[in-house]
Image: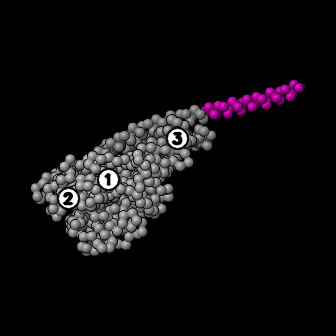
Amino acid sequence: MGPDKARRRRRVVGRVVVVLVVLLAVALLVAGWLAFRAVQTVNALTDAKAAVADVRRALDDGDTQTLAAALPQIQDATGRAHASSSDPVWRLAEHLPRVGPQLAAVSTVAAALDDVSTDALPAATTVTDLLGDGTSIRGADGRIDLEPFVAAAPELVDAAAVARAASADVAGIDTADLVGPLVSPVEEARDGLAQVAGALDAGAQAATMLPPMLGADGPRTYLVAALNSAELRTAGGIVGSLAVVRADDGALSLVDQRSTDELKGLAEPVLPLSEAELAVEGTGLGRYVQNAVMTPDFPRSAELLAARWQRDVGGTVDGVVATDPVAVAALLREVGPVTEPGGTPLDADTLLATLLHDAYLRYPDLHAADAFFADVASTIFGALGSGGGDVRGLVEAAADAGAEGRIRVWSAHPAEQEHLVATTLGGAFLSGPFDDAAGVFLNDSTAGKLDYYLRPSLTVEDLRCTGADPSATVRLDLAYDPPADVATFPENVTGTSGVVPVGSLATSITLYGPVGAAPQGLTTDQGVVGGKSATVGDRPVTVVGSRLDPGGRATYRFDVPVRDGRVDVWTTPTLTSPGSVSATCPTAAG
């Protein structure tokens, strides 16, 4: 090799070395910049997490001052996190292998949190100000001022849209691509944003729907069904009484009240029943008003109740509301103790025993018991309607009861019903967007009031999330513990069906699989329990009977498919258990 070639080669090598050094320097600078930005982002998100805790406490306590102070802090923190994770260098690095998905996940979470804190959370202060201590929206006479709800609705609707979009962005992050330490924070953000979106959606719907439903655009009438948990039906208990409530510009008044004993059984159903209804519930669903809530679909129950009221009493209604005694007791806790006309004191701690136990022993005559129940209902409604109770406490009690399936609402107005059918408050197990949910429902077969002593429990005991067909085992436990002298109780307590010895309890258990699921039977330690099978809207249905003697126990199990990583099971809300259970699969990386 000549001197010239050697020099040229050294120059080429030198240039390559320079380029490599420059590239290495750039890479180090980029890495350093990303590391610096990552530290800034992490610090900002840590500050945001601390501020979120203050916001949550303020929202729970209705503390507008603390909320007003905490909101700028969280907005500053999420703004810094968003800015630190959205510069051009960071965005380019998101396309790198391995490290890219990590950076993209962080920037997505930061942007979502910033959007929510800036454009959605301020609406929370509106809700807090709106409720306050209740004096600004509820007069001493109990009338609710609807104008603040009308004024707040646009802001809440916009905030809910922002929160939904942010929640969807974070939910779209594939945690399978993330390193272990990043999975938990992303999942925490996902779950938190889903809760915020759900809460703001509920607030927006309430602010939009409450004014017209409470008579802002003209009087409304509602049929209110009081369910009796001492004799179980799918929705929580037989329909014990019906009342018509009038809503006029925020003021509620009791217009009419009837015991369902006054509405005698019909020779034919009040409305034509489908083949599926005849197969599962039988003609009693439409012939007896007490049984209208045997179907797990509350819109159908509401149609049957409204039709029966129109047939026997007269008049159409704008909606139907059903509530159980546990929900009423929660409201009474906020209102405070009352005394019914006969002199019986009632409070949240004694209401259930007084209504569902003591009254039947005190009034063996059914008509006398019905009169007592009517007096109690009118007394409690009077306390609510006259301004009793803290508004925030009443709203929270009603929301909790709705989440547990203890309050159901149907509207005869299509636009309102379109919103209700998509919520648990609407109770549309069959007609709503709940195809992936299973259901296990209880109906008394004793024709008595012995379910006061029944303690059901529903749990997901085995969640199998892997494999080609992920599934779960759901367990139903029944425990029946009446007093030793139950056989001496009046017949209206022990039952008139004659299907079991006096003092024993007969229960019908109805299992609904998710839409498209394979039929599944109920099993005990002795094997599969025999029963009848049907199909309802592409759901497999099995109905079996249970018999419990005093002190008896029974355990049933059934399998359901796991869909989208979770299991949801609707059930009958009872005196001791809510109307649903759910379980979620852990992520593979978690």
Determine the CA span between mark 2 and mark 1. 18 Å
- What amino acid is at disc 3? Ala
Q: Residue furthest front?
A: 501
Q: Secondary structure at mark 1?
A: strand
Q: Tell me where the magenta segment starts and ends, as one range.
A: 1-29
Q: Examine the structure image and report whether residue 125 is included in the region drawn in magenta.
A: no
Residue 118 is tagged as none
Picture coordinates of residue 557, whole percent (x, y): 41, 48
Q: Looking at the image, do the residues carrying marks 1 and 3 touch, with CB atoms under 8 Å apart? A: no
Q: CA distance from mark 2 to mark 3?
A: 56 Å
Work out whether mark 1 precedes mark 3 in sequence or the reverse, and give the earlier one.
1
Residue found at x 86% / y 28%: 5
Which callout, 2 or 3, points at the residue further toward the start of the chain? 2
> Decide: marks 2, 3 in contact (CB < 8 A)?
no
**Quadrant of the drawing holding the N terminus:** top right
Which residue matches tag 3?
A: 588
Q: Amino acid at mark 1?
A: Arg
Please name whichever residue, 71 or 209, is drawn nearer the observer in this view of the structure: 209
Left or right position of 134 against 161: left
Mark on residue 491? 2
Foreground mark, 2 or 3, reads 2
Disc on res. 547: 1
Q: Disc 2 marks which amino acid? A: Glu
**Taking 494 as reference, is 116 left or right?**
right
Q: Is residue 17 magenta?
A: yes
Nearest the viewer among 446 and 260 is 446
Q: How far across and how far down the image is residue 389, in percent? A: 21, 52
Q: Which residue is rendered at x = 42% and y = 37% of the image?
A: 47
Q: Is residue 265 above or below residue 92?
A: below
